[in-house]
Structure formats: C-alpha cells, structure tokens
Amino acid sequence: MEGSAKGKRRWSPGTSQQPSEAEAEITKRARLSTEEPIARQIIIHRVSCSGEREYHETHPTTSHYLDIPAIEVSDHQNTALHGQNHVEDVEDYLEDCFGFSIVVFIDYDCEAYHERIKDDFTRLPMPSMPHEVRSDMKPYFRVLQRNGPLAEANGERLQPSETLQQALHALQGQNPDMPGEWDFDDDLVYPYPKLYHSRHVFAGTLIQTLEPQQQMDLEILFQYVNKRLALDYEKLEELSNAGIVSQEHWLMIFRPDDTVITTQDGQHRALTVKSCRARGQSILEMNCSSWEYDGNFFQKYITIPVQWPSKSRTVAITDLLVYPIRHATEGLEIALRKRGETFWSCRRRKYVSYDVPLLGLGSQLVRP
Ligand SMILES: [Zn+2]
C-alpha cells in the first residue's frame, strides 16, 4: 500500500490495484501458462452515507472507488463524497482482476466529510423562482471553488483470498505466537492485533510446507501488515514508555492473550484478553476470560464494554478502566501475581468450564 488509511495521497489507478487490459491479459496468460502464484493486493475505498443529513437523502448507501474520495471544485452541497474511479460492481471487478491475495476495504463517511467542509461552500446568487422550488435548488447554488481535502478513513477491513484463509487456518496453533483459532469477523479489522503480533510467522520456516500460492498470499499479508502498522506501533511504544496512551492507539495497547487489570467492587482483578474490538471512538468491547472458584475451578468468559475515561485524547495508561498488567505499578503487579499463584495452587485436577455473569462490570455473557 502506498499510503496509510489516514494518508493524504491518492492511490494511482492503473498500478497494483487496477491492472490495465493489457496487464490483465498478461497476468491471465502467465497464470494459464506457468501457474505462477499471483501476488497482488487490491485497495478499494468504500464510501457510506446514511442519508439522514439534509441534502443526502438521495445518496447511495455504499459506493466503491479505486482512489481516495473527496469533494472537488464545482461540486455542490448535495454532491455525494466520491472518488474519480468508480467501481460499479465489486465482485465483477475482483473477478476481472484474475486473483488477489488480499483486498483492503477502506471506509469513509460521506456525512462526516460534509460536516467537516460545510463552511467551505460559496453561495452563488439564485435566480428568481417559486419558493417551493427554491428550497430544493438551494444546495446547487452552494458550490466549492477549490478542491476539498481528501477524505479521512474511519475504518479498514481486509478480505483474504480463499487460499490465504486456508493458509491462516493451517497455521493456527502451530506456534506459540499464532492464535489457536482465527475469528475473521474481528481479526481482519484494523488495527489487526492478532495479525500484527503473529506476522513474523507468515515469513518464517513454518510456511514452507504450504502450497506456493498460500506462501505468496502470506508474504503479501506480511508486507501489508508490516507497512500499514509500523508507524502506529512506533508511536504507541513511544507513548507507552512515558506511561501514556492516546485514544487513536487505545485498542493497540492490548496484545492477544494479554493479562489485564480491572477494578471490581474496589478490588483489582486480573483477566485474560481473548479479543478486542472498537465500538465507535469511545468504547472498546473486550472478550476476556478468567478462572473462578465455587467449589470447583471453572473458566468464565465475559464481554466487557470499556469506555474511554476522559475528554482528553490522551490519558495515563493506569487511568484506563482496563489496562495490561505490564503497565501496572510494580507493587500492584507483584500483589496480583502472588494472589493468582495462591489461588491457582488451590486448584483441583479436574476443571469445570461454564459461563457465569460477572457482577458489577455491566458484562454480558459470551459462549466460549
Ligand atoms: Zn451523503
């Protein structure tokens, strides 16, 4: 990928994401004659509009482009956020691409973009017309006199090829750093914590037993994840070293199977993070597990909605309602680990696993 989802550059069509007819024909011939593995990532920009904002009623709910969308000079107040290279039918387009390793869907919100540029339109004089027509025509006389900024992404999701899905399934549980099981609904959503923390496996010796196309797909995934997240993790580390986390990098502070601390009824307690996803900008939904005892030991699975604790965009990590134990003060970490060891040393050999609601955290049950 040539830029980040929040990047200001346009992806130029006609390169990796839009093969020309000649390139496509070459790819097709190469595929047919040599069966060489295909190495391609495709980037598709996806604009959504709920149609609730004034003048957006007729906008398409979703539209797809090969370049970063924007509103341009001469567009008016009811022009939908759009790119230059429209993809009419995504499935047809992907079929015509003759194979890919990953498709990256980058999301934008038409109404949020219009809110951002609402003061940039110039009012042109309107000719006289009946009142009822005038109100309908008004947005056409509010025009942009120079190009608007490129839209900022509000989400990103990967779609893996079938061979890549097979490769990821083949690798699961094969290495301590690989997830025991993939959940593509969660794991393929930016910032891809499981993919990021297991990415070195995609380029290691473990993949050598896989098919050449599967190896190629993993290589493309490795390159994408590395490039896409390198700066984010650099920034995360820089802030973490100072004991701070930004709202932008909040989700990334949690690693797969991280031990985290929360407070329940005034008591600190430790949980293990199984997965984590953003629900809007200010809420994370965390699936966690913990060991409990009620005469028998059992593993409890809970889903915790966690609110960003401040109006500020950055907070001390220890001010988060849930945070990784590695960021706890030394005394607290030692005390919790000691308590856990004592608790664990009391366990019986046979465990019973079932779900029990965790009171006081507003939690919901999830099935293990
Ligand atoms: Zn719209």
Image: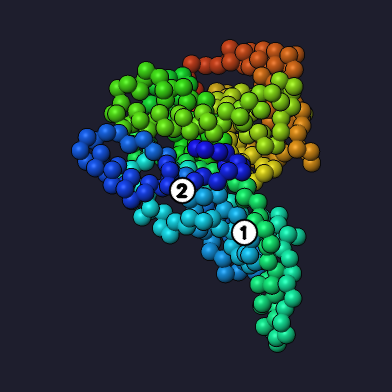
Label 1, secondary structure: give it. loop
**Mark 1 vs 2, N-terminal side:** 2
For residue 195, side relative to residue 95 (left or right): right
Circle 1: residue type: Glu
Please state if 351 lies on the left or on the right of 51 as rendered.
left
Dot 1: few (<14), some (14–19), or many (≥20) neighbours within 10 Å? some
Q: Which disc is residue 13 wearing? A: 2
Residue at 73% across, 59% down: 120
Residue at screen point 75% across, 13% down: 331
| Residue designated by label 1 | 72
Residue found at the very far bottom of the displayed protein: 130
Image side of residue 216 versus residue 55, left or right: left
Residue 312 vertical placement versus 348 (above, below): below
Residue 223 in the image: x percent, y percent? 46, 30
Q: Between residues 249 and 259, which one lies in front from this camera angle?
A: 249
The image shows residue 302, relative to residue 23, as above or below, that is above
